[in-house]
Image (spheres, grey):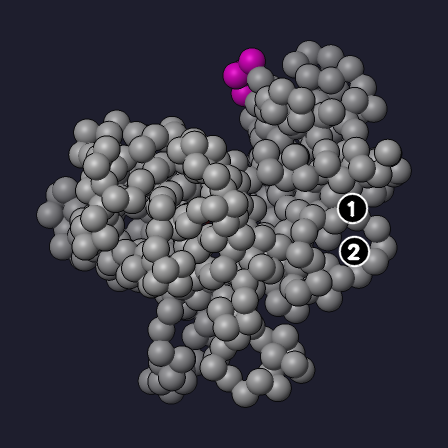
Amino acid sequence: MDVLVINCGSSSLKYQLINTQTEEVLASGICDRIGIKGGQFSYKPKDGSKTTQNVEMPDHEVAIKLVLNALVNPKDGILKSLDEIKATGHRIVHGGEHFTESALVNDEVIHHIEECADLAPLHNPAHLLGIRACQHLMPNKPMVAVFDTAFHQTMPPRAYIYGLPYEYYEKYKIRRYGFHGTSHSYVSKRTAEFLGIPLENSKIITCHLGNGSSICAIENGKSIDTSMGLTPLEGLVMGTRSGDLDPAIIDYIAQKENLNTKEVINILNKKSGVLGISGLSSDFRDLLAADEEGNLKARFAREVFAYHVAKYIGSYTAALTGVDAITFCAGVGENAKFIRGKIVSHLQFLGITLDEKANLETIGKEGIISTKDSKVKVCVIPTNEELMIARDTRALVAGKHL
Ligand code: ADP
């Protein structure tokens, strides 16, 4: 079954056409700068050729129309007809407490995604634009919504409740939700398969380290705690996000800098993290290059990042009362060997030893980077959220036709 996976942001849209039998990516690309001057559309069929077009995309519907046209283009299109696409799978950031798993899109599901927009104002409205555009362009084609929060709905109350008056949870559903769930789910399953250990009897800590970063404690295949919270601002120090801090800092900065709360939160989201600490960049490649040239702030930002990741791994080892495997994924986790090395150097007390050679060689591919006698296996598993979305979409759509 061919499934079109769509990850819709407010001004960009990433897509992949995936054959769910072979799990092969038939085509992929990005629509960038939707609704902004200077739009760019890229299309990459499986033969590896890539075309990029400068084209204005006033809205998401125009962008998706470009995707569909490219897929059936007689020149380098991968499909003869759009009928070959059996369903679309949509990444949805926030599913609140309502969605504990992926769902076939209908009016009720759309209504609940709208309700959660309050909790993810930058993301959910954009996802809905994508869903509505698909409804319009491909009426009657089934759609599945796959939620970043759903995997974490297995967290016990003690992990998701904040130390706030309980009525705020009851009235406003203020609690930890967690994000990157599709990634943590995929990577934990794949870690168990890769190591040949039973997922249903395992303790795994997955570290999704990218621009946005989060960590998840997974017991017997189920998320029991995760570092992001009500929003993706909590947890680790990230590329541009502050992560955990004393909440009183917000008012303190507001007073000192004559800002309102929203403006301070904006700084915590966009100007903080390793960008804020280094004053240089949110990109770990830039920080490494600067560090090598002797930039001490770049070095310090990398150290802070690694320290926080290690601290979370330590606390999640306690949450799980032990750990069998720790897995790194996403841009930094899959590629940044020195950061991985720094993180693991904090974890020797757990009997973990790094295989230096394996760590240097395991870049962007699956591998074990701990030594054979390490008490805990440390792995690198490239994440694949699109494949998880395609799998869920197939499963729900196939179920519908039974
Ligand atoms: P997101 O999906 O959150 O945007 P990614 O998972 O794509 O992020 O990760 C992007 C980040 O990964 C970049 O900002 C960069 O810091 C880091 N990264 C990518 N490649 C490398 C590399 N070769 N070495 C170090 N860091 C890298």
Left or right: 375 as drawn, with respect to 63: left
Q: Observer-nearest residue: 337 or 379?
A: 379
Q: How far apart, in angstroms, are the residues tagged by discs 1 and 2? A: 8 Å
**Disc 1 element:** strand
How many marks the image carries: the answer is 2
**What's the residue type where badge 1 is placed?**
Leu
Query: Taking the image as drawn, is residue 93 in sight?
Result: no
Q: Which mark is residue 104?
A: 1
Above or below, 21 relative to 124: above
| Range of magenta residues | 47-51
The amino acid marked with disc number 2 is Val
Does dot 2 land on a helix, a strand or a loop? Answer: helix
Residue 310 makes an appearance in the image? yes
Q: Residue at x 38, y 30 (%)?
A: 366
User: Which of the image's four quarters has the C terminus?
Assistant: top right
Q: Position of residue 38 (x, y in %)?
A: 57, 40
Q: Which mark is first along the chain, 2 or 1?
A: 1
Dominant secondary-structure state across the stretch colored magenta: loop
Which residue is identified by label 2?
Answer: 109
Task: Using the image as rendered, state which of residue 196 and residue 357 is in the foreground.
Answer: 196
Q: 185 left or right of 63? A: left
What residue do we see at 67% from left, 51% from top? 101
Q: Quadrant of the N terminus?
A: top right
- Percent coordinates x, y for residue 183 in the rendering: 51, 44
Q: Where residue 40 sits in the image (x, y, percent)?
A: 58, 35
Mark 1 touching mark 2, by CB under 8 A?
yes
